[in-house]
Image (tube, rainbow, N blue to C red):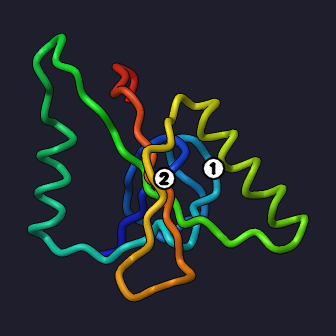
Amino acid sequence: MKIYFCPECGAYDFGDGIVCADCNELIPNDSWADVCADELAELEFVEEYELPPGLPSWEYEVIRLESVVEEDKRGYALQLLNSMGDKGWELVSIEAPTGQSTARFGVFKRAWLDYF
């Protein structure tokens, strides 16, 4: 079955729509995945799991970073990084997968908030 994750609001849902059912934002092409019944059961468990009050928790986001050559790409990269900061995300590191010299991924974290 096909499932999507919305990077804007954190929701996940089934379907073939192009916008998130919760926040009506466009779903990026890389936010879709095929999941089996076992993986779906794990997602449902995590969604219903409640942490004890006062326990410090973090959530993480990984975003592919494009190499900045052209001015419009540079502007987009700056806008992306600034919007992550505006949403409370902190850049933890920039990683490159083993064996790939061009692809870079930004690893961000922020405190887990009650409304997520």
Q: CA distance from mark 2 to mark 1?
A: 8 Å
Local secondary structure at mark 1: loop
* Percent x, y of residue 32: 44, 70
Side of 51 relative to 27 (left or right): left
Give amino acid for label 1. Glu
Q: Which residue is mark 1?
A: 25
Bin the neighbour count of mark 2 within 10 Å (Cα to Cα): few under 14, some 14-19, many 20 and up.
many
Residue at 24%, 28% in the rendered image: 57
Q: Which residue is mark 2?
A: 6
Side of 108 relative to 45 (left or right): right
* Percent x, y of residue 102: 57, 82
Give amino acid for label 2. Cys
Side of 52 relative to 94 (left or right): left
Residue found at the far top of this picture? 54
Q: Nearer the viewer, residue 18 or 7?
A: 7
Residue at 13%, 34% in the rendered image: 49
The answer to whether 31 is drawn above or below residue 81 in the figure is: below
Residue at 50%, 51% in the rendered image: 7
Q: Nearer the viewer, residue 109 or 38?
A: 109
